[in-house]
């Protein structure tokens, strides 16, 4: 399989970097600010979703119809503060990234988050400059994940046919997007007990040797 992979595209939140703890702290603060309690079920519904989808869900969760955009703005400000201290990489992520780069395969990021957030956390991890051929965010496409637009844009920028590219994802939303783009999809579920359908390969960690083998960088 690996010899058929010409490029690799990483999701960011919860896959490349462990930003989900920062998001959870921000979401918990937002809910408390509006007199509610943030739960694991809320988290499962929000993980991997685009800003627009998150806004619509927050309206319902907090019973504040028509206030989705404002709630999302509040959440964005909160999470930007939470990430100032930096966010750690997910297990195996940096090692896999370096292996892909050492193999000479173009590599990119395709994230459903806003560009300001993605650039802040990549910068904090020392990954913003020189590590990726392209960084595509929800701000750059008309239709974020689960539509294929982000992955199609990333593949185009990397000069790779989607059918000869791999996507690394932690959420069902992201896997659906990569599948719709026609890519080989590796799923690393952020919630191990949350089944994700449709991935070409599902593992517990990017450190699993099957990932490097599938990408042709073992």
Image (cartoon, grey):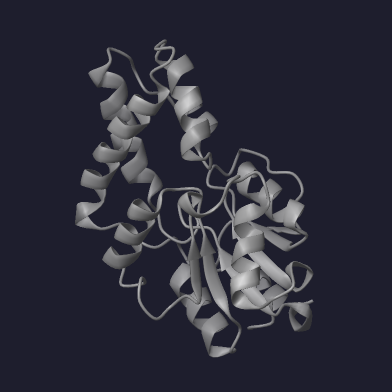
Q: Is residue 52 above or below residue 19?
A: above
| Residue at x 26% of width, y 46% of height | 80
Does 162 sit above or below residue 71? Answer: below
Q: Quadrant of the N terminus?
A: bottom right
Q: Is residue 145 left or right of residue 15?
A: right
User: Would residue 212 be visible to someone looking at this image?
Assistant: no
The front one of 182 and 218 is: 182
**Residue 103 point in image, percent of width and height:** 59, 89
Of residue 106 and residue 197, the one placed in the foreground of this image is 106
Who's the residue at 76% across and 73% down the image?
Answer: 164
Name the image quarter holding residue 107: bottom right
Q: Quadrant of residue 205?
A: bottom right
Q: How many marks?
A: 0
Q: Give the residue drawn at x 72%, y 73%.
A: 214
- The vertical placement of 6 against 58, above or below, is below
Q: Report x, y in % for residue 12.
A: 47, 57
Q: Position of residue 111 (x, y in %)?
A: 50, 54
Q: In which quarter of the view is residue 161 placed? A: bottom right
Visible in this render: residue 96? yes
């Amino acid at each position: 399989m690996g010899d058929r992979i010409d490029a690799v595209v990483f999701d960011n939140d919860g896959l490349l970097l462990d930003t989900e703890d920062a998001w959870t702290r921000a979401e918990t603060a937002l809910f408390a600010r509006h007199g509610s309690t943030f739960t694991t079920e809320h988290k499962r519904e929000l993980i991997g979703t685009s800003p627009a989808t998150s806004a619509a869900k927050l309206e319902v969760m907090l019973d504040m119809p028509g206030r989705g955009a404002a709630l999302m703005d509040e959440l964005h400000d909160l999470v930007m503060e939470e990430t100032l201290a930096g966010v750690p990489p997910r297990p195996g992520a940096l090692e896999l990234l370096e292996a892909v780069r050492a193999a000479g395969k173009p590599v990119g990021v395709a994230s459903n988050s806003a560009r300001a957030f993605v650039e802040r956390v990549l910068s904090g991890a020392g990954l913003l400059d020189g590590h990726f051929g392209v960084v595509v965010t929800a701000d750059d496409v008309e239709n974020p994940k689960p539509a294929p637009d982000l992955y199609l844009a990333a593949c185009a920028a990397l000069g790779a046919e989607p059918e000869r590219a791999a996507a690394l994802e932690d959420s069902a939303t992201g896997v659906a997007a990569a599948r719709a783009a026609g890519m080989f999809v590796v799923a690393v579920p952020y919630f191990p007990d949350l089944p994700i359908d449709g991935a070409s390969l599902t593992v517990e960690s990017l450190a699993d040797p099957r990932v490097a083998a599938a990408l042709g960088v073992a």
